[in-house]
Image (cartoon, rainbow, N blue to C red):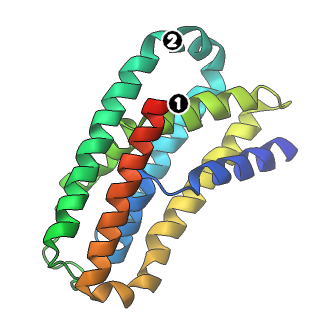
């Protein structure tokens, strides 16, 4: 239980910081679009990465110098592009919260965006595979530690996705969407800049 609780709280502390993945889940929750599938996709993706990190950290540690530049620059390029898209949406405006099921993006497009924000983001690999994988080696049961971290992802993403509906009255106004898109763009660019300067 000690290993599992340590994994849960460490995993939760890493995922709480707003990032590309969290911002997208929040946005989908606010719009009421494909909420379950988006939350499930994020949680399962995290579970796969955490499991890989906890079970294979020794191998990752030896090979990481070869793959780091690919993850880094590919991820930075994606974050810059996604930030640009959100800044353009903030500039144009005109979006307001519509009734559930009215006109938003298709399920396939939402899931592809969600997968890209997860699997193309270098922070995800650094947090789940590298950091949690390395910390898991300090506990008697790396498996229990990993299970706790996986549980934290499921709890967080479903809470964020379904809890976002409490903010719907605020986001019935177009200005609120413009501010959200502006903040998301700054977050994406901030993550990209931090990755390049580290």
Residue 140, image quadrant: top right
Q: Of residues 179 and 31, which is closer to you in this image?
A: 179
Picture coordinates of residue 63 (x, y %)? 53, 9
Instruction: Establish if 175 lies above or below 46.
Output: below
Residue placed furthest toward the bottom: 169
Q: Residue at x 72, y 33 (%)?
A: 143
Question: Which residue was labeled with disc 1?
Answer: 198
Q: Residue at x 73, y 44 (%)?
A: 7
Disc 2 + disc 1, Cβ < 8 Å: no
Picture coordinates of residue 182 (x, y %)? 31, 65
Q: Is residue 14 visible?
A: yes
Q: Residue at x 35, y 33 (%)?
A: 75
Picture coordinates of residue 187 (x, y %)? 41, 54
Q: Of residues 38 and 28, which is closer to you in this image?
A: 28
Dot 1, crowdedness within 10 Å: few (<14), some or many (≥20)? Answer: few
Residue 107, image quadrant: bottom left
Q: Helix, strand, or loop for circle 2?
A: helix
**Of callouts 2 and 1, the N-terminal one:** 2
Q: CA distance from mark 2 to mark 1?
A: 15 Å
Picture coordinates of residue 131 (x, y %)? 64, 32
Instruction: Establish if 185 lies above or below 94.
Output: above
Q: Of residues 98 and 87, which is closer to you in this image?
A: 87
Label for residue 154?
A: none
Q: Nearer the viewer, mark 2 or mark 1?
A: 1
Q: Is residue 32 visible?
A: no
Label for residue 65?
A: 2
Instruction: Establish if 79 lies above or below 31.
Output: above
Dot 2, crowdedness within 10 Å: few (<14), some or many (≥20)? Answer: few
Q: Of residues 6 and 176, which is closer to you in this image?
A: 176
């Amino acid at each position: 239980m000690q290993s599992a609780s340590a994994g849960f709280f460490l995993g939760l502390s890493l995922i709480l910081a707003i990032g590309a993945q969290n911002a997208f889940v929040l946005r989908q929750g606010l719009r009421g679009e494909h909420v379950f599938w988006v939350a499930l996709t994020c949680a399962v993706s995290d579970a796969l990465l955490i499991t890989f990190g906890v079970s294979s950290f020794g191998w990752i540690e030896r090979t990481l110098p070869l793959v780091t530049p690919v993850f880094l620059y590919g991820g930075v390029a994606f974050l810059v592009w996604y930030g640009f898209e959100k800044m353009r949406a903030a500039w144009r405006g005109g979006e307001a919260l519509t009734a559930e099921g009215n006109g938003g993006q298709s399920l396939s497009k939402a899931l592809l965006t969600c997968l890209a924000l997860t699997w193309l983001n270098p922070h995800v690999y650094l947090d789940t595979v590298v950091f949690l994988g390395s910390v898991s080696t300090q506990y008697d049961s790396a498996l229990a530690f990993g299970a706790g971290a996986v549980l934290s992802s499921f709890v967080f993403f479903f809470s964020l996705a379904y809890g976002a509906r409490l903010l719907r009255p605020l986001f019935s106004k177009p200005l609120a969407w413009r501010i959200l898109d502006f903040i998301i763009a700054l977050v994406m660019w901030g993550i990209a800049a931090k990755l390049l300067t580290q």
